[in-house]
Image: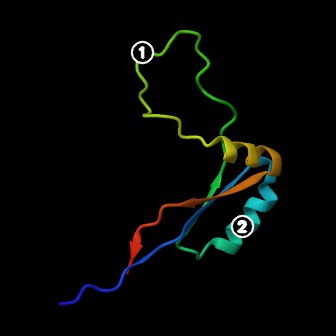
Amino acid sequence: MDEPLRTPTRRLAFIVSPKRMDLYEKLREALIREPDVDLILDRRMADRRVADSPIERERRGGERRLAEVDAEVREYGWAVLRLRGAARR
């Protein structure tokens, strides 16, 4: 039996500052039925690593924040990321 054709999915993530709840609500209404779009309310305030003592071993496996995204959220109140999409039937 032939395998169905798979096309790559373009997934997007909208990250919105809590200072822009108006935008968050409008995007939520507009994107509620979009399966390939994530809407994220940014709740981060600052880097949580504030201890003066050195870290023995990194548990998180690397930096997860992207400096460009942080800068966009701070400056504009939102940012959009293109995520690697899974193949869809």
Q: Residue 11, image x and y in percent?
A: 54, 67
Q: Which amino acid does label 2 sit on?
A: Leu
Q: Name the residue under label 2.
A: 27
Q: In which quarter of the image is the N terminus?
A: bottom left
Left or right, residue 27 beside residue 66: right
Residue 65 picture quarter:
top right
User: Measured from the top left, where is residue 15 in percent x and y?
Assistant: 67, 54
Residue linked to disc 1: 56
| Residue furthest top as drawn | 53
Q: Which of marks 1 and 2 is nearer the N terminus?
A: 2
Q: Is residue 81 above or below residue 70?
A: below
Residue found at x 41% / y 28%? 59
Label 2, secondary structure: give it: helix
- Badge 1: how crowded within 10 Å, few (<14), some, or many (20+)? few
> Which residue corresponds to the image point at 22% horizontal and 89% vertical from the top-left?
2
Vertical arrangement, residue 65 with respect to residue 76, above or below: above
